[in-house]
Image (spheres, rainbow, N blue to C red):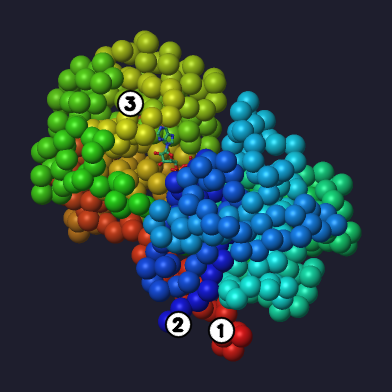
């Protein structure tokens, strides 16, 4: 495949700016595309956290103010993995104390429409006929609502342009704004229509990408099917179903260097598939750290998660007593909805021998839970891709997960057949209910007693390849399909 010039537009990129999985995808996928020989630029706002970490050079393009946007400048800086980033410097929009989307109190920035409209406008300028630079992308890859207006700007500008790809990382976030923003963002009035950017009376950034991008992708094949109907289509299922020929599901990879039990410095004892007995030291270390007694015969179940209904935390709360009565121990690390945090803490108080809960964000503890738990719980209501089920398989900690989105695609359920042929890597349940979750945990606890069968499940998960290479090849094949011959070297 001949190398392609790809502009990857994103509102987050690890390690400079991260609020969630998008940052890891931006870093992991672009590095893997470069490893395949492609010529990639990551377009990212120059937030203070980015400016503090990036080795920024003088601007190479000063973009003048337009009728609708202030002037801005582009600077190049290499990401730690070597991929060049193009930073959009626009102090009035991006240089403020707080996060990429919210102030320090968790309120959305009131000018988010214009902040990310600017990012999308710059992406469109680079991908369109007006780009004056030596480097012009053949593909513009947009991610989530923050960059989703770029395909719309390109469409309304007309003229030659790069092929466009729109990736949905989580359809629950759509970038909805009042209709007055249409004019303020320099979008034509006619764009505010049902077959344009209008969504129930509001302007939808994400719809811009879904209507006008040449291809749409999302982060697992199952999620690609689920979003074409209610309830996971969040009102956009009709449009997604209509565009299904252009809609592709490509599962994310993970950072294999950061999540490797044979080299992980954040765990008590390193191990691999041939030294699985050493994993037990991590279980003891975890129990000790969280004040749980040793219970050699009881499986320890781990969770590291945002504590939200999306993640099915309420399902766990409902059957936690039955789960630990099997017997089993349960360890939960996370932060999120206050009522769920309080219910979990109450369960830990009432069952101090078997349940430990830590509220907060704690990366080292997350690693120790992956290494020390016997199995990992992910009862998500929906999960576009999910990361922890892949981490846990790599750590020999079989996941027990609801069969949705990426959890359906990256775990092989333990059935008599898959156990017999050695392909089982975890446990699925289908129904969104506490009892279905409990039944899956019981199934896992029973198999846990069969040490030989359990070892086989652990080893099958540890042998699975969750690197970014496979995903990068799929994206590259999609880009190549979109870039018609003749477009390549203009
Ligand atoms: P989502 O992006 O929907 O929250 P993912 O599974 O895709 O879910 O990614 C979440 C990532 O954040 C995982 O790597 C998970 O381990 C990590 N994480 C979530 N909560 C915590 C926490 N409290 N402490 C440490 N890591 C966490």
Q: CA distance from mark 2 to mark 3?
A: 49 Å
Q: Check the image and report above or below for 467 versus 310.
A: below
> Looking at the image, can residue 255 be seen?
yes
Which numbered disc, 2 or 1, marks the residue that appears first in the sequence? 2
Q: Check the image and report above or below for 273 versus 291.
A: below
Q: Position of residue 227 (x, y in %)?
A: 59, 54
Q: Position of residue 367 (x, y in %)?
A: 30, 36
Q: Contact, CB < 8 Å: mark 2 with mark 3? A: no
Rate crowding at label 3 as few (under 14), some (14 to 19) or many (20 or more) other CA atoms within 10 Å. Answer: many
Q: Position of residue 232 (x, y in %)?
A: 59, 48
Ligand 1, seen in the image, is in the quarter at top left
Element type at mark 3:
strand
The disc label shown at residue 331, or none: 3
Q: Check the image and report above or below for 17 versus 135.
A: above
Q: Check the image and report above or below for 99 versus 195.
A: above
Name of the residue lying farthest toward the right:
189
Q: Which residue is mark 1?
A: 488
Which numbered disc, 2 or 3, marks the residue that appears first in the sequence? 2
> Looking at the image, can residue 245 be seen?
no
Q: Contact, CB < 8 Å: mark 2 with mark 1? A: yes
Which numbered disc, 3 or 1, marks the residue that appears first in the sequence? 3
Element type at mark 2:
loop
Q: CA distance from mark 3 to mark 1?
A: 53 Å
The disc label shown at residue 405, or none: none
Is 194 left or right of 99, judged from the image as shown?
right
Element type at mark 1:
loop
Name of the residue lying farthest toward the bottom:
486
Q: Which residue is mark 2?
A: 2
């Amino acid at each position: 495949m001949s190398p392609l010039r790809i502009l990857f537009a994103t509102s987050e990129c690890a390690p400079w700016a991260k609020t969630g999985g998008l940052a890891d995808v931006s870093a992991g996928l672009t590095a893997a595309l470069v490893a395949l020989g492609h010529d990639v630029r990551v377009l990212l706002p120059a937030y203070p956290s980015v400016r503090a970490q990036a080795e920024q050079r003088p601007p190479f393009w000063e973009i003048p103010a337009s009728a609708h946007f202030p002037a801005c400048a582009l600077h190049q800086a290499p990401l730690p993995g070597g991929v060049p980033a193009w930073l959009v410097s626009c102090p009035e929009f991006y240089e403020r104390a707080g996060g990429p989307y919210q102030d320090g109190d968790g309120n959305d920035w009131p000018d988010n429409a214009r902040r990310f409209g600017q990012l999308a406008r710059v992406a469109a300028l680079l991908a369109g006929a007006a780009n004056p630079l030596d480097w012009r992308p053949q593909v513009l890859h947009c991610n989530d609502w923050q960059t989703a207006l770029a395909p719309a700007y390109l469409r309304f500008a007309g003229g030659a342009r790069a092929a466009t790809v729109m990736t949905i990382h989580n359809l629950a976030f759509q970038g909805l704004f009042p209709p007055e923003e249409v004019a303020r963002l320099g979008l034509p009035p006619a764009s505010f229509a049902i077959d344009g950017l209008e969504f129930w009376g509001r302007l939808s950034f994400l719809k811009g990408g879904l209507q006008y991008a040449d291809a749409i992708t999302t982060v697992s094949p199952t999620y690609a099917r689920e979003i074409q109907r209610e309830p996971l289509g969040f009102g956009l299922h009709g449009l997604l179903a209509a565009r299904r020929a252009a809609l592709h599901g490509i599962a994310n990879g993970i950072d294999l260097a950061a999540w490797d039990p044979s080299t992980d410095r954040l765990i008590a004892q390193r191990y691999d598939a041939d030294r699985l007995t050493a994993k037990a030291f991590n279980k003891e270390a975890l129990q000790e750290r969280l004040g749980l007694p040793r219970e050699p015969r009881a499986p320890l179940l781990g969770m590291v998660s945002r504590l939200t209904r999306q993640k099915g935390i309420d399902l766990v709360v409902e059957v936690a007593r039955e789960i630990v009565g099997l017997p089993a121990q349960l360890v939960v690390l996370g932060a999120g909805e206050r009522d769920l945090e309080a219910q979990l803490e109450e369960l830990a108080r009432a069952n101090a021998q078997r349940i430990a809960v830590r509220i907060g964000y704690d990366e080292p503890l997350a690693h120790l839970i992956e290494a020390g738990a016997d199995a990992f719980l992910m009862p998500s209501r929906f999960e576009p891709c999910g990361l922890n089920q892949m981490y846990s398989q790599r750590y020999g900690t079989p996941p027990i997960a609801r069969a949705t989105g990426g959890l359906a695609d990256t775990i092989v359920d333990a059935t008599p057949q898959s156990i017999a042929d050695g392909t089982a890597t975890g446990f699925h349940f289908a129904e969104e209910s506490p009892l279905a979750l409990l039944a899956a945990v019981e199934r896992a606890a029973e198999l846990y007693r069969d040490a030989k069968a359990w070892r086989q499940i652990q080893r099958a998960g540890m042998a699975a390849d969750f690197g970014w290479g496979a995903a990068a090849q799929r994206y590259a094949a999609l880009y190549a399909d979109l870039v018609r011959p003749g477009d390549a070297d203009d």
